[in-house]
Image: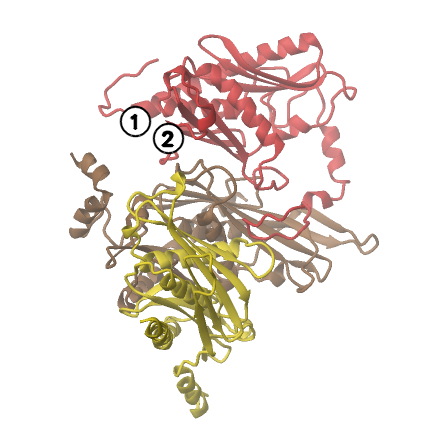
Amino acid sequence: MAAGFKTAEPLEYHRSFLKENCRPDGRELGEFRATTLNIGSISTADGSALVKIGNTTVICGIKAELATPPTDAPNKGYIVPNVDLPPLCSSRFRPGPPGEQAQAASQFIADLIDSANIIQREDLCIESGKLSWVLYCDIMCLDYDGNLLDACVIALLAALENAQLPEVTINKETELAEVNPQKLHPLNVTKHPVGSSFAVFDNTIVIVDPTAEEESLSTATITVVTDEDERLCALHKPGGSGLSAEKLQDCISRAVTRHREVRKLIEEVLKSIKPQQ
Amino acid sequence: MPVDTRRVRAPEESQCPLLFVPLLPRGPLRTVAQPEKARVDGRQRSQVDVRPVFARCGLVTQAKGSAYMEAGKTKVLCAVYGPRESERKDDTDMKAGRLVCDFRYAPFSCPKRGTWIQGSEERDAAQALQEALRPGLCLHRYPRAQVEVNVLVLEHDGSVLAHAVTCASMALVDAGVEMYDLVLGCALRQDGDSYLLDPTLAEESGGHATQPEDNQGGVTVALLPSLGQVSGLHADGELRDESVSAAVRACMEGCHRLYPVVRRALVYAARRKAAPPGDSLET
Amino acid sequence: MHNARNAMEVESSSTCALREFGCEQSLLSRPDGSSSFIQGDTSVLAGVYGPADVKVSKEIHDRATLEVLIQPKVGMSGVRERAQEQCVRETCEAALLSSLHPRSSLSLVLQIIHDDGSLLSCCLNAACMALMDAGLPMGCLFCGVTCAIDRDGRIVTDPTMQQEKESRALMTFAIDSTERKVLMSTTKGSFSVNELQQCIAVSQRASEKIFQFYRDSVRRRYSKTL
């Protein structure tokens, strides 16, 4: 009976749970799904992280390459983030070039890297005007069950903190770069933003960490990203129903506590893999 | 070159740092690896010595069926969707379903970063995968429908196609698609008079042991293990005829080594799915 | 440190000065609704087509399918435009009563004529005027306001390109006409919660002017024809 009700009237089904201040998967309205993190599992990447928020699984691999710095900023490097939603992760995505959602997510991550100042682009320059690093941050969703942006932000940050770049020197005689893969240096990650996403039901009820089904039934979604100084790095609400100032304030407060929880998780996992390296 | 407008812009040109590693320190490493001796990872040459395999079903919750496989450092994920309505209306087969395969390397899966755009190697692998899996499937049970197999290589450390075949067939079983038999894959690298089973990436592309270009090549075999039939065979390089038949036999033996591991993973997944835990599902 | 001069500036910014803005509707003959919106030197041309037939693959059984296309002044549209399209589309979807036109298509094309800052808010305003011109049923109107916080912490509404470049944080909001709630929000740079709330408050005040303008222009237009 319940299964039939769920299929025929999904919105009513969810409402009947929200009325009792809980959700079909047994969570409270302000409860995130279990978040797990695996860092450094891909040895071909310079840094990698696999994040699971409930069923949603996202993997981020960092590959560093060398290029000439941009002509308008000769003392800077590049960071190129891309989010991919392959048909493997959900039946809603078709094969082919990335769709609107994947592109919007890529842009969101690219903006966030600048806004939060996660990595100073100047740190990626090896020799001004000649050589700098390009950090390709490729983020792939392996299992799509909502709240993509939160998972992407955690995966990106953990992978950047895991990344090790080889030492590069420029040979004075030949003027050519020489890479020493034995000497590895971590990246200088200056800020550590964490995102929290919310969905709005019936223009009023706010739930955190929506699943794919909750996302599709909701009237709006919001992503709040905060850094360790409790400053906002992004307030991303791509439309949908309006939100009052009080509700927004609640979201921000929840995002601040979520930031602390996730930071603790990332630090614990990073610490646990340190001795092996 | 056309600019990819659907992705964040990258600099027009960038080089893999491995190209800038001075060649000197790499030289001795090559000469240390002597032929007829143990392989770099401790396995024996000319022995049916496969890497330890980890296999698990049902990791992608959104898919009808899925499987993840690790062999050494090679990591492959596969998700199966369908059978569902065929997308290409023009060539819907009224009698049998269509098997659609997609094969992709994650951009960070290889030593050198790959592009997002599907290359010819990936397309060839998808084709080979489709041809290897088809004989194992009862596609006539799904007229006018299509079954989609999506393979993603998360880390490439050799024998990718072989493991993709195994992983995909596990995902198909997990999805409940009717099959005649499992399809298992195994790869081999012939190096002169000796062979390396389940080669790593370094061994696949690695140096010549004896004289260069003498009996060098790769063989990948897909096997239906309980029927004992070969459903896919790929060979490249220059191989002597007796080495080819020996290689196929070694690969078949390698597949049989894999069989119990795969079966255990499938039984485990089936047990977990079945509602009463007491059900025995011996195959 | 924060002396009277600073207080004065907050005061002056709270008047939320917008650049001179204007709009022309029904200037194109082929689309079902069109508008051109100008804010200072920033200018966007919008055209709306529909309700019309929809491709089967994009059909939604209980409402209209809205597509938004943003064409940059030069070159091809890229990832940035796609993200902006998503923002405009979801804002329009919230305002439009699209369930009145199930299984049909609406498309909105925004051609950027010139970008001198506050582009996204200009796109939103042009979109709203074009939707009105097309006579599509809407639950509320909306407008876009961009705020920049400069190095001294002052809030500049409707910044020019130069002001955007010099700013420390940049936010664009879409405000609805009935309750002045935030429909859409996108930000760049980092800022405190307090700054965010100030910016929202300033944008809400600025939206009054734009809504008044909407009202006046509609009145002017229909007083002639009626």
Chain the render paints brown: A
- Under mark 1, the amino acid is Arg
Answer with the quarter of the image where residue C180 lies. bottom left
Q: Secondary structure at mark 1?
A: helix
Chain rendered yellow: C
Q: Which residue is mark 1?
A: B272
Left or right of residue B42: residue A67 = right
Quarter holding residue B67: top left
Q: Amino acid at mark 2?
A: Gly
Work out whether C179 lies above or below B90. Answer: below
- Residue behind mark 2: B58
Q: Is residue C124 left or right of residue B158?
A: left
Q: Among all residues in the image, which is located at the extreme right?
A: A173
The quadrant the C terminus of chain C occupies is bottom left
Q: Describe the colour scheme in one phrase.
A: by chain
- Residue A230 visible to the viewer: no
- Residue C70's disc number: none
Q: Position of residue A246 (x, y in %)?
A: 27, 68
Q: Residue at x 72, y 43 (%)?
A: B19
Determine the residue positioned at 69% across, 43% down: B18
**Is residue A216 toward the left or the right of residue A139 in the image?**
left
Q: Please name the residue shown 30% across and 63% down the image.
A: A242
* In the image, residue B73 above or below residue C178: above
Indicate the position of residue B22 as horizontal and vertical percent values: 76, 44
**As rendered, which of C38 and B179 lies closer to the eye?**
C38
Task: Residue C115: give x, y in percent of width and height.
Answer: 54, 68
- Which chain is assigned red? B
Residues at marks 1 and 2 touching, judged by CB atoms closer than 8 Å:
yes
